[in-house]
Amino acid sequence: MSGKPTDTPVTTTVTLSAPRRGEPVRPDIDPAKARARIHDAEVALLDDRRLLNGEELAALAALPDSYVTSLAALAHQVRLTWCGPEVEVEGILSAKTGGCPEDCHFCSQSSRFDTPVKATPFLDADEVLRAAEETKAAGASEFCIVLAIRGPDERTMQRILELVPLVQDKTGLNVAVSAGLLTDEQARRFAEGGVHRYNHNLETSRSFFPNVVTTHSWEERQDTCRLVRDHGMELCCGALIGMGESDEQRIELLTQLQELDPTEVPLNFLNPRPGTPLGAERPLDAWEAIRWIALFRLGLPGVILRYAGGREVTLRELQSMGMTSGINALIVGNYLTTLGRSVEEDLQMLTDLRMPVGALTGVL
Amino acid sequence: MTEEGHDATALSEGPHCTGCGSTSCPGCNRTLDPPRFCATCSRRLTVTVTPGGWRARCRDHGELASN
């Protein structure tokens, strides 16, 4: 073999995979225009301290992949400016699993689909307390009791109202509840019973919702969200992205969330579950997930934006990047029916990022 | 051994996949899923997932826990 350098430069062709179904092709744009869009958003959010409208968010969502890091950097500054450096840590527990009469196409707990998840009755108080203590041991300030139901019947109401003060007293954690659709009376009783935050997700935009849920309407969810706020509880209203919705529909959801003005938005990424109608979908691409974390922060600058289900399978090695793209809260440990990565890994990530753990309730 | 005296390994070591219950599956149970089917009898397990672990129970073959 000769040591003489070759005259012909070696070139390597890398073929990137085509955008998946439903994923937009974002053409290159004039760099000056792209920078101007990001600059305008920065002025609006950091100087004028106003919300971006749907048109402004759509312009940012249309930027090519090479601008995702710029969106993420701005989102991180927005998060620090509007919310501060603290990260809120929460544990969740499925206190009543499976057997749900609703047909949410992403959910393995629906009784309408043949999934591996077997229905189990309401856990007893000791089991719920043990789970809350596990959450407390992880350094969390928040514990959410979740039930797979359409809405609570009277017996369920009473059990929840017994559990909430019990968990609060024994652990000192703030207790949130997720028990489906509520009536006005039920919302009032939860508020009076010490439920400080109630979770009820919109999941997706009004226009896409009928594609993934047919047993209740988007408007019913919106009504429950409004009742939660009307009765003085903090509203936790999340999104699930990666179900086949378009960019426009994600922007639509963002503007609908702006209107509801929740305290917290848990951001879920579809983790396709065997046996569900969405079981054969592919998880969202990691880079696309980073783009949408940033856009959620830019659209909802003051919310607690929480990493929720699906982050491990979607983001893999990019989970810490999400923390510097707008996220300021985590569900740690396991989810409702699936497992998360270890609490230690998440806490180490926060240490490495120099992000202090703290409660965000009432400070935003 | 479980409380009832069953060998807990029966839930995790047997001819059936703990992810789908099939005998022909090479193992579809993903890292971030608890077992859902008994490896010995393929019965669907009663699973409780908590923030710090999980517990899976087969009516005939006892209980297995993450820790």
Image (cartoon, coloured by chain):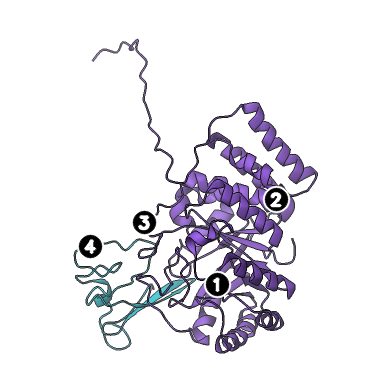
Chain colours: A purple, B cyan
Q: Nearer the viewer, residue A359 or A240?
A: A240
Q: Nearer the viewer, residue A230 or A48?
A: A230
Q: Are marks 4 and 1 in contact (CB under 8 Å)?
A: no
Instruction: Name the residue that disc number 3 marks.
Output: A280
Instruction: Name the residue that disc number 4 marks.
Output: B25
- The chain holding disc 4 is B
> x and y percent of residue A85 in the render?
68, 54
* Displayed quadrant of residue A277: bottom left
Q: Earlier in the sequence, mark 3 or mark 1?
A: 1
Q: Nearer the viewer, mark 4 or mark 3?
A: 3
Instruction: Name the residue that disc number 2 marks.
Output: A80
- The chain holding disc 3 is A
Location of the N terminus of chain A (image quadrant): top left
Residues flagged by tags 2 and 4 on a common chain: no
* Displayed quadrant of residue A114: bottom left
Q: Amino acid at mark 4?
A: Cys
Q: Earlier in the sequence, mark 1 or mark 2?
A: 2
Q: Amino acid at mark 2?
A: Leu
Q: Nearer the viewer, mark 3 or mark 2?
A: 3
Q: Nearer the viewer, mark 2 or mark 4?
A: 4
Q: Nearer the viewer, mark 3 or mark 1?
A: 3
Q: Amino acid at mark 1?
A: Thr
Q: Amino acid at mark 3?
A: Ala
